[in-house]
Amino acid sequence: MKFISENKSSFSIEITPLIDIVFLLVIFFVVTSKVGDSQFLSLELPKTESFQYKTVQNSNEIVIIKNGSIYVNDKIFDIDNVNDLEQAIFELENNGDALILSAESDSLHVWVVTVMDLLNKYGFNEVQIRTIEK
């Protein structure tokens, strides 16, 4: 025989303790996390004393001026005339010594990269870069 009960069982979850636990976890992670300057990496860059002692004193020097003029061993070239500049870099003696590339601080970065690409093309592996302050 089947009895009909009028009490229907309903399924429910109490979320009040769940909310309490979530807030406790949030408070725990906020309190234990590091806040402030300690999150940044302290980086000490090397000094340039060794660069001063290893400065090359040879005839290979390229100077880039802010108006677009480039001096290759005291011969002047224009940055717009890349073919003549490339020929002058090709004629530099590459005996394994370092080459000095000096650029005024106001000269464009593209010009420095262009000259460095030409130097790399013709096998100048060691290039010392200097900035000329005005």
Image (cartoon, rainbow, N blue to C red):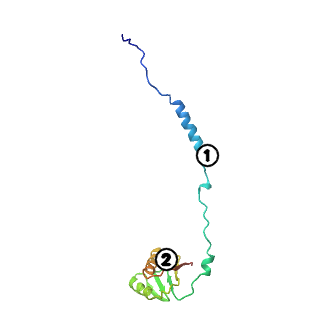
x and y percentages locating residue 88 in the rendered image: 43, 87
Name which quarter of the figure residue 90 lies in: bottom left
Considering every residue shown, the one lying at the far front of the view is 1
Name which quarter of the figure residue 11 lies in: top left
Which of pointers 2 and 1 lies earlier in the amino acid sequence?
Answer: 1
Q: Amino acid at mark 1?
A: Thr
Q: Is residue 78 left or right of residue 102?
A: left
Residue lying at 46% horizontally and 75% vertically, measured from the top left? 113
Distance from label 2 to label 1 (Cα)?
49 Å
Say which element carries label 2: loop
In the displayed structure, 94 sits above or below 22; it is: below
Residue lying at 62% horizontally and 72% vertically, measured from the top left? 47
Residue 32's disc number: 1
x and y percentages locating residue 52 in the rendered image: 61, 80
Q: Residue tagged by mark 2? A: 107
Q: Is residue 103 left or right of residue 1?
A: right
Residue lying at 61% horizontally and 61% vertically, measured from the top left? 42
Considering every residue shown, the one lying at the far top of the view is 1
Quarter of the figure with the C terminus: bottom right
Quarter of the figure with the N terminus: top left
Say which element carries label 1: helix
Q: Nearer the viewer, residue 64 or 73?
A: 73
Q: Nearer the viewer, mark 2 or mark 1?
A: 1
Q: Amino acid at mark 2?
A: Ser
Residue 108's disc number: none
x and y percentages locating residue 86 in the rendered image: 41, 84
x and y percentages locating residue 44 in the rendered image: 62, 66
Counting the numbered discs, the total is 2
Determine crowd level at label 1: few under 14, some 14-19, many 20+ residues with C-alpha closer than 10 A. few
Q: Nearer the viewer, residue 5 or 17?
A: 5
